[in-house]
Amino acid sequence: MKLYNLKDSSEQVSFSQAVKQGLGKQQGLFFPQDLPEFSRDEINELLKLDFVSRSQRILAAFIGDEIPAEQLAARVKNAFAFPAPVTNVEDDIASLELYHGPTLAFKDFGGRFMAQILAQIAGEQPVTILTATSGDTGAAVAHAFYGLNNVQVVILYPEGKISPLQEKLFCTLGNNIHTVAIKSDFDACQALVKQAFDDEELKHALHLNSANSINISRLLAQICYYFEAVAQIPAEKREQLVISVPSGNFGNLTAGLLAKSLGLPVKRFIAATNVNDTVPRYLAEGTWQPHQTIATLSNAMDVSQPNNWPRIEELFKRKGWALSDLANGVVDDKITQSTMRELAAKGYISEPHAAVAYRVLRDQLQEGEYGLFLGTAHPAKFKESVEATLGQALPLPQELAERADMDLLSHFMPAGFATLREFLMERAPK
């Protein structure tokens, strides 16, 4: 598999190099040189397979023979050791529940696959994973890499801007997991990560790698659950399928569009955002104009400068698709709460991110179409806001209950690079 840097197409790397490197020169994202496509018959055969077998074939179509088939199959089996069920909500709408993994969020798929692949290709070389999180990435990455030999993980997150239970899930591990609360927002955390990757001395000393959705291994892993969703939908509904994706950093939507590029039958995708609406405004007005990030109930989507957007533009250009065909919608907190109550009345308990995706889907779904919205996190991860909105108590799943009373092990820092750099250099392999 060859990939090129979207900011400097002369920089071309292998899949293994892209996984280890994370970002290219000028903080450019890597993108596949070849975009494989399955025939309709091949798609139908894939949809008959079990999740792990199908995923191995999808990933092999991108990765090629760079990782031997048997080893790739074993890595996929270890990573995808939990289901992604489709649950009916209405006659014409269902939810793809991506929160049945160890940290109760969709990031478990990408985080665990990346950990498996890095273990495969890094061998005994020490690696430092540096990543920023708006909530769920931190937990998924921390648990995926926890206890792995020769791997240190440093996770930056915005202090006071993720849910308390999200924080407890990954800031109580210790060992090789280091968590840093930054006194700012997610965009500032992401900017600090980019500064670190621009620092050649730091990058070399720590063998830096990023586990954000910018890493190609995480992105490819996420393609697989879109196929798993379609496999669970009755064949007669597949041609009219509309998928609504709660969108913050836009990695999840990028993966869905890559699934469509492979040949997966999806009529259209909807990019559903909260009031941090840089992309919907861009699609409407043609001007890229990020505003100051606004804190919302759907905090994992509080992103004003989504990192993965250049990949979506590149894919549309390569495929000859029109960006004007990408449906989108914006939902504020008031409507998010009323939607959560609406879903609860239908017997479906939702957290804010899924509610945003459902709202836009319900509003835009046309007669004869079948809608699917992504449930990206377990409602209990947002226990406080869900309980306050619905006026009912939520039981804690075991994964959260066992950490709820643990002490946080986080370090607290201002949003300045000098302090972070010193912190990181103290943890460089000797």
Image (cartoon, rainbow, N blue to C red):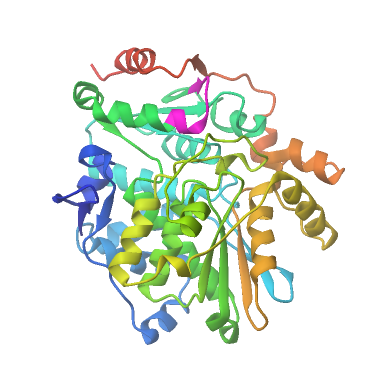
Q: Does the magenta stretch include residue 242?
A: no
Residue at 42 percent across and 58 percent down: it is 254
- Judging depth in this view, the residue of 302 and 211 nearest the camera is 302
Residue 411, image x, y percentages: 50, 16
Residue 397 appears in the figure: no
Task: Please state, as top left, top right, bottom left or bottom right, where the N terminus lies in the image.
Answer: bottom left
Which residue occupies 52% across, 29% down?
185
Do we see residue 276 in this rendering? Answer: yes
Q: Nearer the viewer, residue 316 or 134?
A: 316
- Report the number of discs: 0
- Figure quadrant of residue 33: bottom left
Is 182 one of the magenta-colored residues? yes
**Residue 298 left/right relative to 14:** right
Tell me what residue is drawn at x 49 percent, y 75 percent: 266
Q: What stretch is highlighted in magenta?
A: 180-189
Q: Based on the displayed image, in which of its 4 quarters is residue 132 positioned?
A: top left
Residue 8 x %, y %? 18, 47
In percent of width and height, residue 261 lies at: 37, 71
Give the residue furthest to the right: 391
* Residue 18 to residue 237: above or below: above
